[in-house]
Structure formats: C-alpha cells, structure tokens
Image (cartoon, helix red, strand yellow):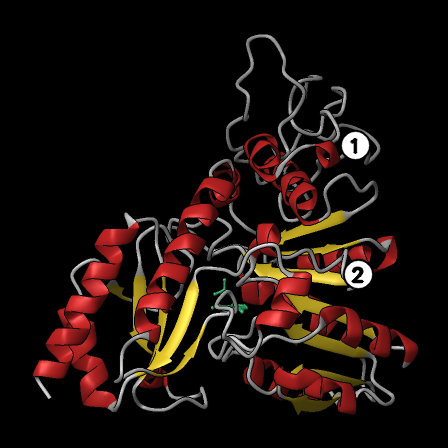
Amino acid sequence: MNEHTPGGTAAAPAPAGRYGDGTRAVRAGLPAPAKNEPPLPGPVFAAHFHLPGEVSGPYTYGRDTNPTWTLLERAVGELEAPGEEGVETVVFASGMAAVSAVLLSQARTGDTVVLPSDGYQALPLVREQLEAYGVRVRTAPTGRDAQLDALDGARLLWIETPSNPGLDVCDVRRLTAAAHAAGALVAVDNTLATPLGQRPLELGADFSVASGTKGLTGHGDLLLGYVVCRDPELAAAVRRWRKIVGAIPGPMEAWLAHRSLATLQLRAGRQWGNALAVAEALADRPEVTGLRYPGLPSDPSHTTAARQMRGFGSVVSFTLPDRAHAERFMTALHLVEDATSFGGVRSTAERRGRWGGDDVPEGFIRFSAGAEDPEDLVADVLRALDSAAAGA
Ligand code: PLP
C-alpha cells in the first residue's frame, strides 16, 4: 500500500463544503492527485491483504474493509453532509442491506420502532423480523406527519420521504425534534431524493439511509446501499452489523458506483426536469387521477417538500381508470421501459399493483423519468395515453 493508494497517507482532498453540487459530484471521494496514478483508482479485488505480525492498518480482510469502499464512502459522505468533519458512511450490498443494518443493529427485544405504513414494500418483511426478535412495531402514514402520534416510548423512528410509491412527504425537522424529545433516534430513507435532493443529517436525522441502486448510481446496472451518520458509536454498530452478516458490496460494484457519482448532478438535473415536465403534461389529462409529484406547486406535499428538499426527484405517480387501461398505456410506450426500480437514465414505469403489497389502485402507475430529451419523453407519454384511451 503506497501513499497514493486508497487508505494510504496522501493529504485529504480539498474540503467539499465550499463547492457547488456539480463540482462536488465530479470530485467526490477522489484521493489527492498523485503522479502516474489514475484520478479514481481502479477496484481493489482482495479477499485478504498482506498482514505480517501484529494486526494493524486499515485493510486486513475483505469482509471488514476494502480501499474501494473507503473512497466510495468518503464520496457519499461528502454528498450527504458537505463540508462536515466526522461524518461516517458505511456502504452495503443493497439498499435493503443498509435498511436492515440500521433497524436490526439498533432495536433490541422490548424496544419500540415506528415505521411508515406506506413505505417501500419490503418494510413489512423487516417488521416481521423485528417482531420475531421481540421488538414492538408501530406504523403510521407518512402524510400529515402522522408518525408524530406514534412516538411515545419509541427507540427509533423510521421516515421515508418522499415515500415510495405514494410520494407523500413529511416534515423531517418537525418529526426529528419530536422524536428526539421522546428519546428516539431518527433514520430517514433518502432513496428517492438522493443526497442532491435532500440532506437528512442537516434536517436533524441521526441516520441517512438509502438504496444506491436507484438515482444515486442511475444506470440500472448495480445494487448498492449506504448508511451515513455523525455519531461514531452508531456508525460502529452499523459497521459491526455489516461484518456480522457480510452484506458487503463487491469491489466492482463499489467502483462503478463511485464512477457514476461524477454524473449525479447532470443526471439529476435532467431527470428532475423531465419528471416535472411529465407531471405537468399528466395534470392536463382527464383520465389521470391521483397525480403526485412533490415538485408540482399544486401537490399537497409541495410546501413541506420545498422547505426541506433541494430537488424533487425523478419519480411521478398517477392512476389510470383501471388495470386494463394502465396495461394498454404501458404497452404503448416506446421510450419508457416496463420495469420495477427507478432513478435510472432510461425512463421506466410500472403498474405497481402487479406486485401486490402496496395499497394502490389497480391503475396506479409509478413513473421514473430518465435523461431523454424532455420533448421526446413527454410526446411518448402523451401518445401512449392517447393510444390507451382509444383502445378503451
Ligand atoms: N428504500 C426504498 C425507498 C426503495 O425504493 C428501495 C427499493 O426499491 C429500497 C429501499 C431497497 O433498495 P435495494 O433494492 O437496493 O435493496
């Protein structure tokens, strides 16, 4: 390990706090420039590292630490909490690995955890697991800050804002203040917003947790998760959990994720603009009901979202009259792939009800705007809506 390799002793890069989002994104986590070394060192494939004599140094065994993770963790920390010293990031094999790491490392038998009742559809599975370990779980909807009423005696409040797939928003500062007053820790799932759209730690949360599979990395080619927090003891508990369950990202995925961060601001800017354009076009259609996009001034969440978000994300949700109508719409789209997941550079959408599990109408569509030209994307959506209506 020389001084230029990740985890080496090269000087820390310039502080991230003073730059704008684009500059921060292209430079996030890079080591100090070193002659004859690449700006972003390649993935380090190692199950073990040379370790003569006493156990010392940052890299010992590949389930504990990896230099490629170190750079990615630094990068994510710079984006989630720009300019802050002492923020710790732990990357995981997937978003669910990160979610489970926080919930299962923090909650003990007899504790109470408050989850959203309208969050990502794997949360009920985590709930079952928590309950199997003797943890009490309460749920309440994201909208109207309804989780406030469930905080009494809680150990941990889990917030998902905007929520997936309903796109409700809650007031993170308000919920966090109430939870802390009640003695509870607060974790925010920041998947939909990405760190460019929302910074949960600045809003008071103890943990920012996300699936990096979505908008953060944006190409639909890898799974990743992360946890960011300020408290070293909380970070150590999460890191310990990763070591115990081995939910580690492969070096190749970690490196690809870091490489993808360079374009985060470019992608997010285009995709958020496209989401707004699609939402505005949908707002004029008589067959569309339940349209939600926190960036639309008419959206019930807009005022709260505008107070705490720096961008409103790439996901739009809406409902078509029935399942057959929604299926005709999906089939008629040319530029939008029928796929689950969201946040990628190629637009995707799905009739969410096909999975079961979400409390949504049969005609409910979750639409993720990609980075296509806005006029092409909007035209494709309007043409598919016309085609679906004509086939009724
Ligand atoms: N959190 C939210 C809000 C999600 O939408 C998802 C996945 O869709 C996850 C967590 C889990 O992420 P992953 O699929 O990377 O495990």
Q: State the residue at coordinates (55%, 62%).
A: 191
- The residues tagged by marks 1 and 2 sit, at their Cα atoms, a distance apart of 20 Å
**Quarter of the figure with residue 3:** top right
Q: In the depicted view, which residue is nearer to us: 56 or 303?
A: 303
Residue at horizontal 64%, vertical 22%?
5
How many neighbours does mark 2 have within 10 angstroms: few (below 14), some (14-19), or many (20 or more)? some
User: Looking at the picture, how far across and down is residue 377, in whole percent?
Assistant: 25, 57
Q: Secondary structure at mark 1?
A: loop
Local packing at callout 1 (Cα closer than 10 Å; few below 14, some 14-19, many 20+) is: few
Q: Is residue 94 above or below residue 90?
A: below
Disc 2 is placed on an element classified as helix
The N terminus sits in image quarter: top right
Looking at numbered disc 1 in the image, what kind of residue is underneath it? Gly
Q: Which residue is mark 1?
A: 57
Name the residue at 56% across, 14% down: 37
Q: Are marks 1 and 2 in contact (CB under 8 Å)?
A: no
Picture coordinates of residue 360, whole percent (x, y): 41, 89
**According to the image, label 2 marks what residue?**
237
| Nearer mark to the viewer, of 1 and 2 | 2
Residue type, numbered disc 2: Ala
